[in-house]
Image (spheres, rainbow, N blue to C red):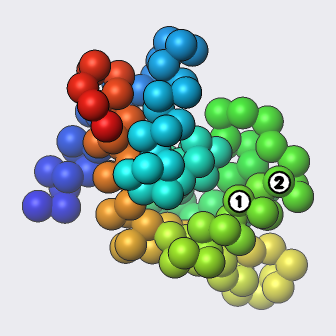
Amino acid sequence: MATARADEGDRQLRLLVGVDAALLPQVDAALLSVCGLTRPQFNVLACLIQQPATPLSEASLQLSLPTPTSRAGLRLLVEHLEDFSLVRRLFTAGNRKVRIIEITAHGREVYFEAVDAYARVIQGCEP
């Protein structure tokens, strides 16, 4: 069941690549109204969900994002997501300076809801 959901999420995410810029305000409104996410927050969840086997450090996550984000900006995004239990930050074994960011089960649910809302906008349906 989880694999089918992940496959559907991947299919829908492929629809989102190359979105017409004219649709972005509608996409932003759908993400915010359906899931309470901004597009940058959605992008963080997308990066984390696309790398399930590879734990991402803050630096790796910063490089994975589709738009340039400062370290301070990323930290704020992650803190907000962590406040809503969508992600968690963990220290790596042996190096307390490096933190790994993981998506939570709740974060996965919200991500798939966001992908559905995003896809509906792109396919011309109401969010």
Name the residue that disc number 2 marks: 73
Residue 64 placed where, x, y %?
Answer: 66, 42
Residue 105 lies in quadrant: bottom left
Q: Is residue 24 visible?
A: yes
Residue 82 lies in quadrant: bottom right
- Is 102 left or right of 73, judged from the image as shown? left
- Is 39 left or right of 1, judged from the image as shown? right
The circle drawn on residue 90 is: none
Residue at 74 percent of width and 43 percent of height? 63
Q: Are marks 2 and 1 in contact (CB under 8 Å)?
A: yes
Other residues around mark 2 within 10 Å, as few (<14) / some (14–19) / many (≥20): few
Q: Is residue 19 above or below residue 70?
A: above
Residue 60 placed where, x, y %?
Answer: 72, 53
Label 1 secondary element: helix
Residue 26 placed where, x, y %?
Answer: 47, 28
Tell me which amino acid carries mark 2. Gly
Residue 124 lies in quadrant: top left
Quarter in which the N terminus is drawn: bottom left
**Across the whole image, how many numbered discs are drawn on residues?**
2
Residue reaching furthest to the left: 1
Name the residue that disc number 1 marks: 77
Q: Is residue 75 above or below residue 40?
A: below
Quarter in which the C terminus is drawn: top left
Residue 35 placed where, x, y %?
Answer: 42, 56
Q: Can residue 50 be seen in this view?
A: no
Label 2 secondary element: helix
Residue at 60 percent of width and 67 percent of height? 81
Tell me which amino acid carries mark 1. Leu
Residue 79 or residue 120, whichever sits in front? 120
